[in-house]
Amino acid sequence: MLKRFGVSLNEDLLSKFDNMLEEEGYTNRSEAIRDLIRDALVKKDWLNDSIEIVGAVVMVYSHHQYKLAQKVTQTQHQSYKNVLSSLHVHLDSDNCLEVIVLKGKAKDIRQFGEKIISTKGVKYGRFIGATTGSTI
Amino acid sequence: MLKRFGVSLNEDLLSKFDNMLEEEGYTNRSEAIRDLIRDALVKKDWLNDSIEIVGAVVMVYSHHQYKLAQKVTQTQHQSYKNVLSSLHVHLDSDNCLEVIVLKGKAKDIRQFGEKIISTKGVKYGRFIGATTGSTI
Amino acid sequence: MLKRFGVSLNEDLLSKFDNMLEEEGYTNRSEAIRDLIRDALVKKDWLNDSIEIVGAVVMVYSHHQYKLAQKVTQTQHQSYKNVLSSLHVHLDSDNCLEVIVLKGKAKDIRQFGEKIISTKGVKYGRFIGATTGSTI
Amino acid sequence: MLKRFGVSLNEDLLSKFDNMLEEEGYTNRSEAIRDLIRDALVKKDWLNDSIEIVGAVVMVYSHHQYKLAQKVTQTQHQSYKNVLSSLHVHLDSDNCLEVIVLKGKAKDIRQFGEKIISTKGVKYGRFIGATTGSTI
């Protein structure tokens, strides 16, 4: 069920907010405010170790790196319960980007992310916290 | 060609570093230090608007949301030169997660990310800066 | 002048938002939403190199470190136009924390922050983007 | 006691790293690498709720805001054990910036930061994790 409430805002601040929304492509304020609220809630979810959450690892590596692809695949299979899916992009003749989508307790999937990123030969890796969508 | 140089470190700090590496799964210090260096370089790349870079959008939305999937697909096709690939995960009966991998100038792909995230019905979105791998 | 507008939100999301506000100490929704909006605007300000902005450096160092305090003071005086004020805290018998508040173009004060943080002997340093308050 | 160890790095990556160090004002690689290591350790400290840590709140508000300054001072006094010191800067005829340096368990001082930032009338606030210096 939709609920409606009023927000009061200084005229000047509102006009700056509207400009920003236009720049970013928002077509109404409610949608933008919902997004700000959901972002804040997801940040909190990441400090709560008792709920299930979704995260992703973005990593870049050279496929020439000896046995790296196998090791990364192996690590994923060892934690197959936490790995939902992965995407592989061929960036150039050397470099690959891989995105691995994870689901589980914050602590577990963060640790999985660290393990992947620390694999010898991974040039760049970042762990990103997202959400299952069910808490927002 | 590999080069080698020495790093001097307080004994206590080194032992804390070694503990952290063990926890995260690193098997040698050089690899961990290379990762720290690459992270710092990629951060700098993101402040440089003249180079090509790779980023990703992670977004969560309900597939029941009217026409959202079409809009997101349409936005991707309009910027097809910047979109390398995408991955779709079915999180539950309502929620989908989509990862879109982008390549281009920092400013352009960040703007594309904002456009996607601001689409009505997208519950959660994050733009992540990564790298082509060729500058690190 | 205050303006008022309505926001519509799913009941469930609203109740989660209200819980978060209570936890964080907010007493009304408008105030919380204004804060979310201002945060978003300040983030944008930091990508705009043409406006004046306020930032801070937080650094930790040992006062036993030879000549470090003098060097840090000297660096501040060289950029005195960008340095508004600083705060020094004695953390323990060895460690000091110093906060330096800066004002200027984003690029300039970020560079100043890097210079301070890179000074030999500074154990920890972070640059934080804030705001003059006049754009929000 | 100082320990020394070797790091091996691709020639190209090393030259990029050296360029970055020069830009940021570092005069030797060991110092820069120590800083990267300490940053990584402090990030880990912030996930550990059993140790004491130092943080700071940077906030901007209008001193015309009714009773705000008193409320902020009052909140600080209620948590005086966690508040080490504070700095006040007059940004313009309306706006003030205040930095409050905190010490305690991560969870407690983060919560204190939220309480301050959520005070009605605070325009902008950020909580920053730093370190006591004794764990790095």
Image: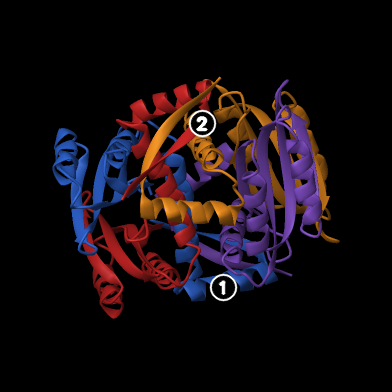
Chain colours: A orange, B purple, C red, D blue
Q: Quadrant of the C terminus of chain C?
A: bottom left
| Front-lying residue, A60 or A101 | A101
Residue that badge 2 annotates: C8
Callout 2: chain: C
Q: Are marks 1 and 2 in contact (CB under 8 Å)?
A: no
Q: Secondary structure at mark 2?
A: strand
| Front-lying residue, B8 or A113 | A113
Within-10-Å neighbours for mark 1: few <14, some 14–19, many 20+: some
Residue that badge 1 annotates: D18
Q: Residue at x 41, y 34 (%)?
A: A6
The x and y percentages for residue D134 are 32, 47
Q: Residue at x 36, y 68 (%)?
A: C116
Q: Secondary structure at mark 1?
A: helix
Q: In the image, what residue type sits under mark 1?
A: Asp
Residue D127 lies in quadrant: top left
Callout 1: chain: D
Spatial CA distance of label 1 from label 2 is 53 Å
The x and y percentages for residue B47 are 56, 66
Q: Relative to B32, is D90 above or below?
A: below
Judge whether residue A48 can be spotted in this image: no
The x and y percentages for residue C10 are 54, 25
Identify the mark at residue A30; answer none if there is no mark. none
Which-is-in-front pick, marks 1 and 2?
2
Residue A31 lies in quadrant: top right
Q: Residue at x 75, y 26 (%)?
A: A80
Q: In the image, what residue type sits under mark 2?
A: Ser
Q: Residue at x 19, y 37 (%)?
A: D75
Q: Relative to B49, is D110 above or below?
A: above
